[in-house]
Image: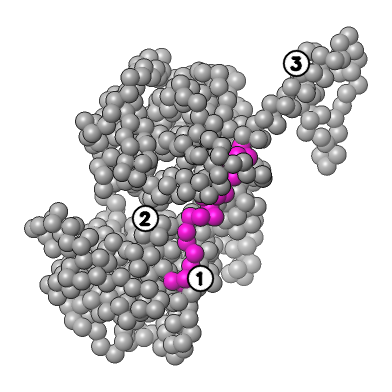
């Protein structure tokens, strides 16, 4: 791709989460919010390096807990139609201190129920209406602007290009980044497929079977993928390469049959159940999905981490005067009195953090060089942290100096998932620590002071905690899945596919933990080398951001090619004149490996005249 100089490019980046939670004007449930918070600034830097002036706006819902008095209301009428009822959305804008402009879309009827910890509806029918309404509002805004490209993040905003075309007769290059294909917006039909689309303001007859039909359900992910592909854009995901040869991009292409065969070979017998990342949406096996691996801001490196800086911790403490950040007075005093940032040349500071972490969790200074196994995350099926509890006592028995530190919580209604950890901490108070309260500074102390980070995820489209832990010298022990394989060169990874064989997976996981602990004890130089390799990871956004800018330029060129093809077809049909019927009678494109796409497109157009 030849990069033009001093070219202006306007991009609309649409997402349900944008991060920026500390501002009170953003939301983050998972990795999506983290990425959308970091990516825009990186895109602008990459564009500047490439001689492009990037004008980027983030489009997102305005959730009910946002203080709209801090936002600037736009003088726009944004019509939306749901279930035959027309109403207007309001649009607000805010420019953050880093210069990023965000456009918020608000309607009390659709979004009044949202709050900081609940921005996704549980009912799929409610979800369909809300995602459709916000996508309509976004499309109306885009139609009134002069954007060159639309970048969609996950299916929640994936209906935007449909409304842009069918309500505003506008086609723009669109790209779709899939952050988690487990969730696809699958919604049962109400009154049939056509009616289900009609009720959200889209024509059901021409769209349902072509885009949305998925075993007699609506599938918003499927529709968005097909529409983006037709627009000349690309479907991307958050780990892998442009060819989709590794990471989540490769996993999304695998069918149930392929996974089952691999699991059979792995365990030497038929597996009971395998997890299919594409959730049986075969479109993933047919459309090309590129991987553009997420980066991680330099602010997460140990020499820049805010949670290791005294002034930042003091400011955080001032915001919660009645509750100390750290429960141990000595740890609290030490962390708030001086900076504890470090790098690969100052590992004595990391050793000090290890001592402080031990003091915080177990109430005493460490003796005899304990091995601190750590886990930070959510107790949900995807993270599979129950496996940590399953192998915990074997780890403690294998190495008398091994200790386990877990900071994790279960969703409301599933608190029973915490019970095994509470039980372990009660039976081994000097060797197992469990905390189910969210505490960001503590989570960073755990990652910075720990020796090994346990990540047995069922699937992990990109993985951020593996980057976070590695950069802090906390060597990863993880399942080889999705984006976690990007740290393969400086981690201990196990592979396991049969979900029904929990004992088999526990054995595979424990073998890697045991190898890691033995290396720590008996091959210290090797362990130190692995730790330094982990800290040296290039997790920057530079290459990935440049690939996105290239992607935007490709989309514009490819849309132009698609349009020229249509012009060519129209010219050919017009040139046939009175021979059109004769030509149609004899024209038969070849099949399979001898077929030609343009021939088939010409035949489709000719058939319209028959």
Front-lying residue, 470 or 275: 470
Residue 84 image position (x, y, % from top left): 41, 14
> In this picture, is 119 found above or below 269?
above
How crowded pointer 2 is (Cα within 10 Å; few <14, some 14-19, many 20+) is rated as some
Queried whether the magenta region covers residue 541, the answer comes back as yes
Please say whether residue 525 is one of the residues in the magenta stretch: no
- Looking at the magenta stretch, what is its main secondary structure? helix
Discs 3, 1 touching: Cβ within 8 Å: no
Q: Which residue is mark 1?
A: 493
Residue at 21% from the left image edge and 30% from the top image edge: 69
x, y percent for residue 57:
42, 35
Whether tag 1 and tag 2 are in contact, CB under 8 A, the answer is no
Label 2 SS? loop
Identify whether 590 is placed above or below 253.
above
Marks 2/3 in contact by CB < 8 Å: the verdict is: no
Which image quarter: residue 204?
top right
Q: Residue at position x 62%, y 41% from top?
A: 4
Mark 3: secondary structure: loop
Residue bearing the label numbered 2: 380
Label 3: which residue?
A: 608
The segment highlighted magenta reads 534-555
Q: Residues within 10 Å of mark 1 (few under 14, many from 20)?
A: many
């Amino acid at each position: 791709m030849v990069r033009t100089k001093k070219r202006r490019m306007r991009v609309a980046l649409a997402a349900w989460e944008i991060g920026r939670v500390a501002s009170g004007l953003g939301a983050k449930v998972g990795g999506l919010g983290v990425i959308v918070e970091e990516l825009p600034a990186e895109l602008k830097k990459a564009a500047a390096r490439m001689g492009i002036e990037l004008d980027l706006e983030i489009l997102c819902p305005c959730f009910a807990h946002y203080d709209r008095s801090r936002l600037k209301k736009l003088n726009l009428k944004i019509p939306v139609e749901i279930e035959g009822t027309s109403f207007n959305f309001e649009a607000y804008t805010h420019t953050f201190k880093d210069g990023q402009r965000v456009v918020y879309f608000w309607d009390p009827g659709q979004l009044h129920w949202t709050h900081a910890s609940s921005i996704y509806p549980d009912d799929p029918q409610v979800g369909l209406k809300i995602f459709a309404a916000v996508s309509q509002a976004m499309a109306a805004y885009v139609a009134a602007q002069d954007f060159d490209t639309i970048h969609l993040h996950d299916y929640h905003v994936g209906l935007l290009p449909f409304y842009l075309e069918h309500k505003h007769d506008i086609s723009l290059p669109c790209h779709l980044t899939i952050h988690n294909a487990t969730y696809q917006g699958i919604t049962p039909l109400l009154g049939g497929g056509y009616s289900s689309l009609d009720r959200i303001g889209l024509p059901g007859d021409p769209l349902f079977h072509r885009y949305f039909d998925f075993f007699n359900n609506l599938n918003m992910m499927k529709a968005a993928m097909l529409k983006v592909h037709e627009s000349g854009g690309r479907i991307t995901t958050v780990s892998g390469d442009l060819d989709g040869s590794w990471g989540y991009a490769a996993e999304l292409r695998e069918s149930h049959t392929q996974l089952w065969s691999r699991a059979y070979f792995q365990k030497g017998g038929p597996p009971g159940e395998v997890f299919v990342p594409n959730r049986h949406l075969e479109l993933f096996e047919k459309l090309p999905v590129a991987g553009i691996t997420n980066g991680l801001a330099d602010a997460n490196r140990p020499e820049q981490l805010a949670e290791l800086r005294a002034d930042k911790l003091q400011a955080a403490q001032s915001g919660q005067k009645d509750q100390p950040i750290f429960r141990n007075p000595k740890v609290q005093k030490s962390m708030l009195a001086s900076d504890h940032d470090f790098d690969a040349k100052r590992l004595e500071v990391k050793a000090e953090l290890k001592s402080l972490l031990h003091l915080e969790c177990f109430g005493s200074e460490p003796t005899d060089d304990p091995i601190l196994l750590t886990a930070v995350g959510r107790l949900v099926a995807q993270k599979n942290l129950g496996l940590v509890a399953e192998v915990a006592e074997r780890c403690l028995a294998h190495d008398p100096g091994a200790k386990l530190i877990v900071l994790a919580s279960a969703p409301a209604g599933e608190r029973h998932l915490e019970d095994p950890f509470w039980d372990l901490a009660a039976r081994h108070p000097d060797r197992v620590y469990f905390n189910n309260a969210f505490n960001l500074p503590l989570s960073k102390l755990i990652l910075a002071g720990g020796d090994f980070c346990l990540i047995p995820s069922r699937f992990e489209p990109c993985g951020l905690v593996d980057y976070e832990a590695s950069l802090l010298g906390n060597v990863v022990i993880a399942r080889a899945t999705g984006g976690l394989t990007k740290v393969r060169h400086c981690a201990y990874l196990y592979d396991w596919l049969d979900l029904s064989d929990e004992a088999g997976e526990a054995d595979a996981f424990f073998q890697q933990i045991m190898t890691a602990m033995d290396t720590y004890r008996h091959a210290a130089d090797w362990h130190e080398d692995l730790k330094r390799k982990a800290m040296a990871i290039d997790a920057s956004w530079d290459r990935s951001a440049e690939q996105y800018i290239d992607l935007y330029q490709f989309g514009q060129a490819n849309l132009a090619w698609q349009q020229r093809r249509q012009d060519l077809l129209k010219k050919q049909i017009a040139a046939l004149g009175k021979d059109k019927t004769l030509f149609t009678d004899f024209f038969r494109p070849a099949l399979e490996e001898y077929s030609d796409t343009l021939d088939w497109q010409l035949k489709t157009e000719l058939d319209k005249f028959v």
